Amino acid sequence: MDNVHSMQGRPSARLAVAGVGDGIVARPRNTVGHSNQVTDNLIEIEGLRFSRGDRIIFDGLDLVVPRGHITALMGPSGTGKTTLLRIIGGQIRPDSGRVIVDGHDVPTLSRGELFELRKGMGMLFQSSALFTDLSVFENVAFPLRVHTDLPDEMIRDLVLMKLNAVGLRGARDLMPAQLSGGMSRRVALARTIALDPKFIMYDEPFTGQDPIAMGVLVSLIRGLNESLAMTSLVVSHDIHETASIADQLYIISDGRVIGEGTPEMLRDHPSTMVRQFMLGSPDGPVPFHYPADNFLDDVLGDA
Amino acid sequence: MLRYLRLLGQWALDWIGALGRAALVWFWSMAGVPQRDDLKLLVKQIYQIGVLSLVIIVLSAFSIGAVLALQGYTQLARVGAEESVGLGVALVLLRELGPVVTGLLFAGRAGSAITAEIGLMKATDQLSSMEMMGVDPLHRIAAPRLWAGMISMPLLTLIFNAVAIWGAALVGVDWLGVDQGGFWGGMQDGVEWWDDIGKGMIKAVLFAMVISWIAVFQGLDSTPTAEGVSVATTKSVVYSSVAVLAFDFILTLVMYGEFK
Amino acid sequence: MIRMRTIEISVGAFVLAGILCLVFLAFRVSGVGVGSTSGSYTLLAKFDDVAGLRVRSKVSLAGVTIGRVAKIGVDSELGEAIVTMEINNDVKDLPIDTGARIQTEGFLGGRYVSLSPGGEDKTLKNGDTITNTQGAIGIESLIDQFIGKMGSK
């Protein structure tokens, strides 16, 4: 995936890839890298605790998502990464801990305040979650119709612009059932940026995609983050892709953060668990064998 | 022994919990300020739930009406009372079979479709993403279906009754030769506006509420997997059917039972 | 994808069909409105036994339905039943000695009041009472009569 790396350094390529020239709503563009971004934190999570029944999902989790950057959350399956996204979005209430998003303590917000906050957030689900009874156009138009009183002509223009940004303007009249997996995700992305949110959460965006679709998504995520000056939080398993676009990574396991930093830092991390994860080694702190008796005894035992 | 008691207790608590959740679903769906899109959503649902059920309702109604007339005629002819076949069929249909059979068919066709659709929306995160966009899924998905069910099923019951009686007339008068005047006259003399049609429609409205409620709730409460949706759909049809029959018994007792 | 317009039309047609069925049921099946369009007047009749007669039972003259039983009351002093009947206005001038009998429709049918006109010149007016009455004949009394007849042989 060297292409993606090299693209990062070239402003014109970044802009071209994002399709910006064709008309995303104008925003202050970041053509010189992130140095002139305000580096305060959009999200601060402190001491998060959450259990489901008997299972402890989060046990004192702390993490920080800086504005204007792409932050990645990684970790073994089942560690509750999707749950964390839902907590940030206010869908689930944690047992204790502070979840500050853009200055608001999310678990304490009222219904109305949550509604306002959600206008500025977007979430891209693993399954793209397009509304199956609406066309591509109507799916992207949905948030606009719900949150604004804009006339139909304006909505039409906005929808076409968003679809163009993800390269699917020509697919506007198709139904979700007619789209491939990669196309669905791009439409979902167009829907997510419909209201120009400042913050987008991506839940496993790269899972199950072919290399081309993967490349498209990677460049879109990067490009949108740059051109729209957004903050992105990506949850993923894919080390390669995620490491190539993330400014910083968090590795989560057993309900807490076990490693954080840039991809290079993490590859040399003192914790063996982090290294096993980054390198994808089959055996290590997360064992290969499910707990079982001694092999020889088991096999010879029935003889 | 103790273990079984514990399981029974757990099951009862689960059941009560589900009932509580279902009540909340009902409350929060019915509450809520009507919005711009609501009428359009409602009309679309009435189409999906009501109009698309017409075929099975009409076919069943005609067959049942015809069969009732046939059987009724055979039995009544024995005592020379064939002319009462019109009245007999009409009473049975209006009071019992109309609401109940329509209810069962509705639960099977429309109820299961509602549950499956909502369950699938839950499993593919459509409901979650709606919530994240600041749209209340109860208002947008559940409420239109609840109202559509409550409007459609009574209409379907009316259509069922009318078609069944017409089917009975075709068989009785045109085929079996019952005197037309006797058929309709006997019916008109004996069928009461409130007692038979009215009370039958009350049943239909009640069944409509129960079936729609169960169908929507089972969809919303389903486990978000393929298997979960399948289980929920089955539960929806079974619970609805049992509820219809149980309420029918109770209502019939209350409305027509004569307590000295 | 079915167009919205088609959906709206079919839903409208559906609702219309439902209403038409309701109308059909009301008029053709339950006979609402069948009968007098000209209003009715009230006649009373006292019987010693009205077993099986119900409110809304027919009142007929020579086999033609001319009215309905509106109310069935009781005179506890005399031990009689008072039947209030609504008679169609187009059946007027019933003689004052008109008889009223409670009969059974067919073999298994319900009870109804059968009127047979008398010969007097004076006619019954709204609110008048028919005095020439014969109560319902129950199966029991028939059997009693039969046994009585047998016994006297």
Image (spheres, rainbow, N blue to C red):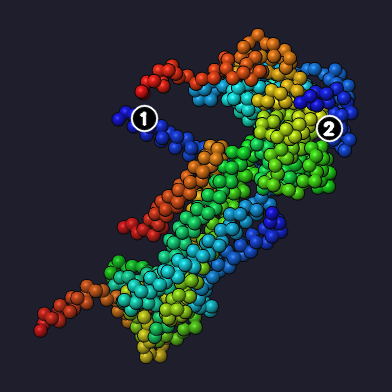
Point out which mark residue B240 bears. Answer: none
The image shows residue A279 at horizontal and vertical percentages of: 66, 18
Residue at 73% in and 14% down: A264
Give the residue pinned by disc 1.
B6
Residue at 45% in and 34% down: B14
The front one of B213 and C60 is B213
Q: CA distance from mark 2 to mark 1?
A: 62 Å
Instruction: Identify residue type, mark 2.
Output: Val
Binning the other alpha carbons within 10 Å of mark 1 as few (below 14), some (14 to 19) or many (20 upward) gives few
Front tag of 2 and 1: 2
Q: Residue furthest top?
A: A270
Give the residue pinned by disc 2.
A17
Residue at 48% in and 71% down: B167
Residue at 49% in and 68% down: B62
Q: Is residue B46 above or below residue C153?
A: above
Q: On the rendered image, what quadrant is the C terminus of chain B found in?
A: bottom left
The image shows residue A193 at horizontal and vertical percentages of: 77, 35
